Amino acid sequence: MMQRSVMAAWALPFCTPIRQRPRGRAGLPRKFALALALAALLGASNSLAGDATQAAEAAAPPAMQARTLLDTTTTWAGQAIEYPQGQARVVALEIELAEGGETGWHTHPFGSFAYVLEGELEISTADRQHRVAAGQTLAEVVGLPHNGRNVGQGPVRLVVFYTAADHQALTEHVPAPAP
């Protein structure tokens, strides 16, 4: 499988990708936390249901703990999660949004899932709002224009896993809805 560089091709004007910057001793706690987040989010995208998720957590080796972060079949707005057609592609980004910053109105043509590392984010559609904070997860809306806004103090940092089809753009910027 071809490895793809996800630099300029995916760069979104509202976020800054964070380079690997280990924290703590050799960066192990952060890498481990991100690995657990990825495992939990991908587990959700593989349709692990409640009992199966609990069984997986119970089967974890004694030296490891597993905690379900997200297990859903719908987005936060209630849309059914569907997989894209064609060659599958998963992209993981660490995104930082400055205090008071906004993403700008945009859509995603496929499912994406986020884990908030730091801060508080409010996501708005034309008719509803949803908030997530550090330690929480989010199943992003699909094909529905939305805007993310940092409503906390300090930056919002999140890891987002995109489940795109190969060669598919991760996001499309759209005009804000009429008031």
Image: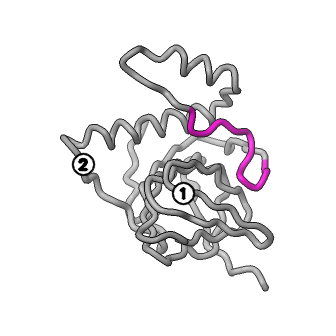
Residue 111 in the magenta stretch? The answer is no
Q: In this view of the protein, which residue sits in the foreground, 80 or 116? A: 116
Q: Do the residues labelled 1 and 2 touch (CB within 8 Å)?
A: no
What segment is highlighted magenta in the picture?
A: 68-79
Residue 139, image x and y in percent? 64, 49
The secondary element bearing badge 1 is classed as: strand
Q: Which amino acid does label 2 sit on?
A: Pro
Q: Residues within 10 Å of mark 2 (few under 14, many from 20)?
A: few
Q: In this view of the protein, which residue sits in the foreground, 97 or 170? A: 97
- Furthest residue toward front: 153
Answer left or right for 110 relative to 178: left
| Looking at the image, residue 84 lies above or below residue 174 | above
Q: Which amino acid does label 1 sit on?
A: Ala
Tell me the number on the disc at residue 22. 2
Residue that badge 1 annotates: 133
Mark closer to the chain start, 1 or 2: 2
Answer left or right for 134 relative to 122: left
Residue 92, image x and y in percent? 46, 49
CA gap, disc 1 to disc 2? 22 Å
Which residue lies at the image location 25% right of the left edge and 53% below the top edge?
21
Q: Residues within 10 Å of mark 1 (few under 14, many from 20)?
A: many
Dominant SS type (magenta): loop
- Furthest residue toward bottom: 179
Answer left or right for 136 relative to 129: left
Answer left or right for 25 relative to 95: left
Tell me the number on the disc at residue 170. none
